[in-house]
Amino acid sequence: VQLQASGGGLVQPGGSLRLSCVASGDIFSVSFMGWYRQAPGKQRELVAIVRGGDDTEIVDWVKGRFTISSDNAQKTVYLQMNSLKPEDAAVYYCNQGIIRRYGGYPVSYWGKGTLVTVSS
């Protein structure tokens, strides 16, 4: 199983980016999909997660600016980031709970990360 994230880049404060993460490989289903971020010198932190396709959770400091959505059939999770601030700059990692067979338990997989830079 591999997760491929894309969509990062350089954006000015107030700008927008849309991150995507698609899973590929031997996958029966996906239990949860989420985005984490890690800024230099800081620990990786949860940004948003969607469970079962429609149960979403977004951390308070991005609520109202970021939206998570998913397409379970395409095994893809998106993070729409609006009104970006310099403090949002980080490497963003996608995380998916992959079930590889009927009745199996989800195993957590991580993408390699995509860099988001917010600067004028």
Image (cartoon, rainbow, N blue to C red):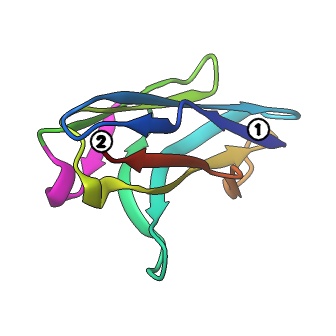
Query: How far apart in space, not on screen, are marks 2 and 1 (Cα)?
Result: 24 Å
* Residue 25: assigned label: none
Residue lying at the far front in this picture: please name it: 120
Foreground: disc 2 or disc 1: 2
Give the residue number, with chain letter if any, for mark 2: 56
Asked whether, in this view, residue 6 is left or right of residue 28, the answer is left
Secondary structure beneath label 2: strand
Q: Residue at x 47, y 46 (%)?
A: 116
Tag 2–tag 1 contact (CB < 8 Å): no
- N-terminal label among 2 and 1: 2
Give the residue number, with chain letter if any, for mark 1: 102
Q: Where residue 17 sits in the image (x, y, percent)? A: 38, 29
Q: Is residue 53 magenta?
A: no
Q: Where residue 120 sits in the image (x, y, percent)? A: 29, 43
Q: Specify the amino acid type for callout 1.
A: Tyr
- The image shows residue 10, relative to residue 89, as above or below, that is above
Q: Residue at x 27, y 55 (%)?
A: 86
Q: Specify the amino acid type for callout 2.
A: Thr
Q: Where residue 10 sits in the image (x, y, percent)? A: 45, 38
The quadrant of the picture occupied by the N terminus is top right
> The magenta stretch spans which residues?
54-63
Asked whether, in this view, residue 86 is left or right of residue 78, the answer is left
Secondary structure beneath label 1: loop
Asked whether, in this view, residue 102 is left or right of residue 65, the answer is right
Q: Nearer the viewer, residue 78 or 118?
A: 118
